[in-house]
Amino acid sequence: MDQAGVTVGAILLAGGRASRMDGAAKPLVEVGGATLLAHAVAAARSLGSAPIVAVGPPLADLAGVTWTREDPPFGGPAAGVVAGLRAFGDASPEWTLVLACDLPRAEQAVALLAEAAAVGPADLDGVCLADAGSRPQWLTALYRTAPLRARAERLPDAGRDAPARSLADEAAIMVLSDPDGRSTDVDTWDDLEKETRR
């Protein structure tokens, strides 16, 4: 973040089934010489995030990264965020980065989020990017931690099977256009080929 003294934590979602990639460990897929997980961790570190919590089966031993799992596994992204927030323990950063581990350009996406959050109004609850169809990408977002915690804890069954958008219900979220496609993710082998060529 550009503001002095602003604290950020990070929740990196790395536990999906990757059914459209034949069940591959998608966060370990490489694009541009680094895994998608490494791109996500680098993006979190670019904000000085602490703690950094990765939600999913432990895929790599990374300094400064704590692994946790939603219960039961594969409960969906909202459940992953609930688990990630609980893994923060006593840490209460002002902002929480929520990032799916499928973004080849995670650092560029997070830079755009941070710029917007730094100049947003005081009552702003979060910022997220929109995809090419103008759909909010709730898992490429910065949220104020306190209201995010409150919304997460209200979810039934610890967020199990809840849609990602439930994390933003009744919240003041700034949705940013993404003309450069920084939030483009890798969901299929074709996506991977396109991002590799890029």
Image (cartoon, helix red, strand yellow):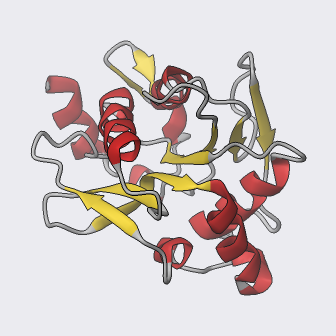
- Residue 190 position, x and y percent, is 22, 44
Q: Position of residue 151 (x, y in %)?
A: 65, 75
Q: Can residue 61 be seen? A: yes
Q: Residue at x 48, y 30 (%)?
A: 3
With respect to residue 148, does 6 lie above or below?
above
* Residue in view at x 72 percent, y 64 percent: 82
Nearest to the observer: residue 45 or residue 26: 45
For the view shown, which residue lies furthest in the top direction? 33
Report which quarter residue 189 is drawn in. Answer: top left
Looking at the picture, does residue 105 appear above or below residue 145? above
In the rendered view of the protein, which quadrant contains the C terminus? top left
Q: Which residue extends farthest left? A: 179
Q: Is residue 115 left or right of residue 37?
A: left
Q: Quadrant of residue 167?
A: bottom right
Q: Is residue 71 left or right of residue 121?
A: right
Q: Is residue 76 visible?
A: no
